[in-house]
Amino acid sequence: MTERFAYADDLGPEQLIELTDPHSGLRAIVVVDNTAAGPAIGGCRMAPDVTARECVRLARAMTLKNAAAGLPHGGGKSVIAADPKMPAAEKERLIRAFARAIRTTGSYIPGPDMGTDETAMAWIRDEGARSVGLPRELGGIPLDQTGATAHGLLAAARAAEAAGILSLKGARVAIQGYGAVGRWCAHRFAAAGARIVAVSDSRGVALLPDGLDPARLDAVKAGGESVAAYPGAAAADSGAVITADCDILVPAARPDVIRAGNADAIRARLVLEGANIPATEEAEQRLHARGITVVPDFIANAGGVICAAMELRGLSEPAAFETISSRVFANTAEVLAQAAQNRTLPRAAALALARRRISKAMGFRRR
């Protein structure tokens, strides 16, 4: 019996639910980590190799993220074990089966994540479950179309600039993952005067020291090709983006892409964690020892969940983006200042910030 509670600690998880449906072939896991501050918000991820451990770790990242952002929500996550590139009709059937299975789980509100989008959130709502990141036609602020997470990552970069870590204008940026987060990062950082020198997708990397044009990258992807097909760019395997010669590295795809085996080869001065749990604990420690600043995931990429929380309250897109800018900038500045003052990792400072807020919320609960 003990192994069933291997993930439990002083914060959670409160629930770990395994969902199966023989008719649709659904195999999914929902983790509600902590709801002291309110119902849990966290993405619904679809991938063929997801695990319970990954879901638990991602749910905890959402607890910390919501707390650090000062939102009245706890953290949760769901994973569906399936290929997101399956035929559209099959995917809809699977998402709808998932939605029916979580209708009675009132403490969890899913949003878009890797392998899902605003259309999937609309299907979930149509089945009677709550969701965020809805299409505009349903009153939502679609995260994939607005670049909310990337907007927050740029705010984190501006806070690092204000702290004297680097200058954003002219900074060389490498982006791992050219999906919903990575694509918008390329556009927003380029518009801010940075130079996109490397991007990757699951099929390869495009390297160009003079800078990649995000519009041309979009055109390459729209044509069904990998970013590695970008005209004039040097191609490489997907892992090469992590060690690209750059000032800012934005890992914006899968967990644990920065690890002990490649941390010592990273050449960036600043790592902005655009994905959840993209680096191992050991890797972050190695980067810190080398003088590389890492802004943790639940601080840097909070733009998406802040936007989702604002949508849930019926606020406008401009109001949501103003909130993203102010909160992510302020939290990043506080974390960097505390880390410098205490001579510790930014993650340690960020954890202290989030845990203070979670503990205060838990103090209001019946004992």
Image (cartoon, rainbow, N blue to C red):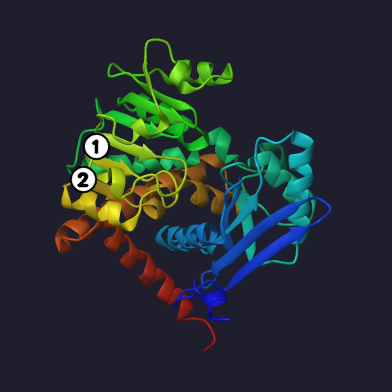
Horizontal side of residue 246 vs 254, given as left or right: left
Q: Residue at x 33, y 54 (%)?
A: 331
| Residue 12 drawn above or below residue 100 | below
Q: Residue at x 28, y 53 (%)?
A: 284
Q: Which residue has dot 2 on it?
A: 292
The amino acid type, in three-letter code, at marker 1 is Ala
- Residue in the foreground of this view, choosing between 312 and 189: 189
Name the quadrant of the N terminus.
Answer: bottom right
Q: Which residue has dot 1 on it?
A: 268
Name the image quarter holding residue 225.
top right
Q: Position of residue 250 (x, y in %)?
A: 36, 38
Q: Residues within 10 Å of mark 1 (few under 14, many from 20)?
A: many
Please identify the residue farthest to the top as the structure is shown. 232
| Residue 159 drawn above or below residue 86 | below
- Residue in the foreground of this view, choosing between 69 and 47: 47
Please identify the residue farthest to the bottom as the structure is shown. 367
Name the image quarter holding residue 232.
top left
Q: Is residue 137 visible?
A: yes
| Residue 353 drawn above or below residue 333 | below
Q: Position of residue 266 (x, y in %)?
A: 25, 39
Q: Position of residue 6 (x, y in %)?
A: 50, 74
- Determine whether the residue tagged by mark 1 lies in a helix, strand or loop: loop
